[in-house]
Image (cartoon, helix red, strand yellow):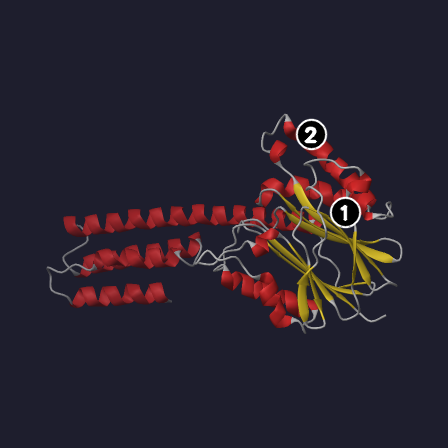
Amino acid sequence: MLPVALIVLIVAVDLQAPNDVHLGPLLVIAPALTASFAGPRLTAAIGATAVAAQVLIAALRGGVATGNHMAQTGALAVLSAFIVVFTVLRERRVRELARAESVAEAAQRALLRPLPERIGPLRIATMYLAAEHEAQIGGDLYTATRAGAGTRLLIGDVRGKGLAAVGESALLLSAFRLLAARHTALPDLAHTLDHSVGRYLLDFAETDDETAEHFITALLLDIPDDEPVVRLTNCGHPPPLLVSHGRVAFVDGDRSAPPLGVHSLAADDYPYETRRFEPGDTLVLYTDGVTEARNRSRDFYPLAERVARWTTCEPAALVHHIRRDLLAHADGHLGDDAAVIAIGRLPV
């Protein structure tokens, strides 16, 4: 109704104005405004209404056949046609973008499946923020699977970000899901995963120069159902946080293996740590896109300091607080993909 009201207002004012004042050219505002919120058909209808209004003004103020009014009517008709063409092209682009986003969402659901809220005695909440606004997926990855009387989890970060890192993410996730239950020890699993990543990077190094420089940081966890412990093997990934009895601490091991795909080690050379993980405790896994997010002062996001504010929260609430606080810290724009997993152990 606003474009129609503008047309009526301009016509009424123009007819009341002195003969040397011509407000008819302002009628182009109506189709231009319509194009900002409507499709080609409504824009064309408003454009035709504006041209008809210009003809009405010309008929009441000196005749349609005068040179000035013919020029104004013709210019308005041409500009309205251009606006309609622009609207058609914009609508086509919007449909293409919507199809691309639907494909990205389908790829994300197939590749990075959401973790269930409950696995055995564990309560889990996740967060994923892609650095590229057009993409739903990127180089960060996580997954979990049951392995005997326990749960195994993986969180990793491919060098790079966005869709370029999806191939390596898909490889590691599929390999982990296939092999997690076959290896009883995490170092053996890490050794096998490193071999798979190395073979993949070697196969594509000759055709892609950037692939030869890729690697994947990874953190493997084994959480048994019947023991209040967590077992970890770290391959160059940031250490997790343990929230226990109101205190927050990094779970740092004595050493860390190289990222997957950098330098293959023997299975016995991979680190293997065991830490207490009791009912009521919460583990916070994350990627470096979280801790390296900067604010306007170029300060890194203090994850441990912020988590210390929410030590009594359930995993879902904790992840919600981290997501909101992280986006506020980075002014809504992250320089790298960011993922967070909060794992709470329930009483048996």
**Identity of the amino acid at label 1?**
Pro
Decide if residue 320 is on the left or right side of residue 176.
left
Between residues 120 and 192, which one lies in front from this camera angle?
192
**Percent of width and height locating residue 144:** 77, 54
Front residue of 310 and 6: 310
In this picture, residue 30 sits left or right of residue 289: left
- Using the rendered view, name the quadrant where residue 301 is placed: bottom right
User: Could you say which is closer to the camera, residue 279 or residue 155?
Assistant: 279
Q: Earlier in the sequence, mark 1 or mark 2?
A: 2
Q: Residue at x 50, y 64 (%)?
A: 328
In terms of secondary structure, where does tag 1 sit? Answer: loop
The tag on residue 202 is 2
Amino acid type shown at disc 2: Leu
- Cα distance, mark 1 to mark 2? 25 Å
- Judging depth in this view, the residue of 169 and 329 nearest the camera is 329
Is residue 66 visible in the rendered image? The answer is no
Which quadrant would the N terminus be assigned to in this image?
A: bottom left
- Would residue 172 be seen by someone viewing this image from the given angle? yes
Residue 57: which disc?
A: none
Q: Name the residue under label 1.
A: 271
Q: What element carries label 2?
A: helix
Q: Could you tell me residue 237's position as x and y percent?
A: 67, 49
Q: Tag 1: Cα neighbours inside 10 Å, few (<14), some, or many (≥20)? A: some
Which image quadrant is residue 205 in? top right
Placement of 223 over or under 258, stated as above or below = below
The image shows residue 204 at horizontal and vertical percentages of: 66, 30
- 242 to 76, vertically: above or below: below
| Disc 2: CA contacts within 10 A as few (<14), some (14-19) or many (>=20) | some
Viewport quadrant of the C terminus = bottom right
